[in-house]
Amino acid sequence: LTSLKADGLSKLTRLDAVKNKLAQVTVSNCEALTELHLNDNQLAQVTLTGLPKLMRLNLYANNLSAIDLSKMNSLLWVFLFDNQISELDLTANTALREVYVSNNPIQTLDLSLNPDIEIVEAQQMSALETINLKNGYCSDWAEYYIEQDNNALKTVFVDPGYEFEYVSKLFKNRPDVLVTTGEGSDPEPPVTDTPFQATVDKIEDGKVYYSVTPQDNETYYHVGYALKSEIDEQGDEAV
């Protein structure tokens, strides 16, 4: 089976066509469809329209370079890992709870309009530079798998409070990744076990401005909060 077209199947609620040799699929006007499973194929193109009740979409392990999810307002679970997708727009999927996009060449993952998101898996993404998790809410059940093999990652935007603390711990050994609420000054950098040198640049209005140079000898600049007496005790530099 190399191609598939399903159109106008008004009573169809679930479609499974996994582990075939599908290269092209069109699924349209299936108003009752809630689950679509097309993983482990050879899909380079997929057309999905007229699926107002679709909640679960499995397209992982294919050859997709693009996917349009803009008309799928009911999506809760999206599995797109192991593809070639470079851009992903999830702004219309406001009900989304779980997204799995690992091993894709995506540069920016924006979940700022997905307040119900609980699980994010975005690892082994060599092009990923920015993740935006700041959407006004973070569940205590949230699970973010975003730290492994994302070597180009520079910035993660988060909500203040629990989410900031949680994500900061994920990147405690990555001083090159800025975890920030984006509200004025940057927060304190994650605690790291990597040897580094911290140089205090200035202390102003209760804030400590300092630069951090880890083993890679590349300098990163931060601002945090500390008592001036604590800095005086350590001197201008700490190793």
Image: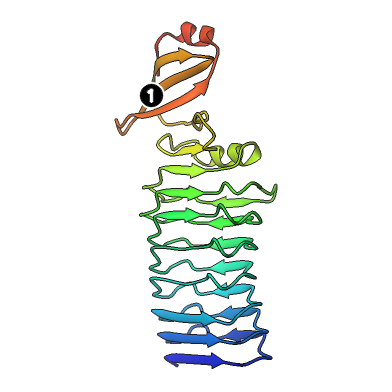
Q: Residue at x 57, y 64 (%)?
A: 92
Placement of the N terminus among the 4 image quadrants:
bottom left
- Mark 1 sits on what residue? 211
> Is 174 rendered above or below residue 63?
above
Above or below, 236 relative to 211: above
The quarter of the rendered structure image containing the C terminus is top left
The image quadrant that residue 226 belongs to is top right
Q: Is residue 73 left or right of residue 152?
A: right
Residue 86 in the image, given as x and y percentages of width and height? 38, 63
Residue at 60 percent across and 49 percent down: it is: 135
The mark total stands at: 1
Q: Residue 183: horizontal and vertical position, in percent?
A: 54, 34
**Would residue 169 be found to the left or right of residue 32 on screen?**
left
Query: Few, some or many C-alpha atoms within 10 Å of disc 1 (few <14, some 14-19, many ≥20)?
Result: some
- Residue depicted at 59% across the width and 87% down the height: 29
- Residue at 50 percent of width and 28 percent of height: 185
Q: Is residue 210 above or below residue 232?
A: below
Residue 23 in percent (x, y) is at 40, 85
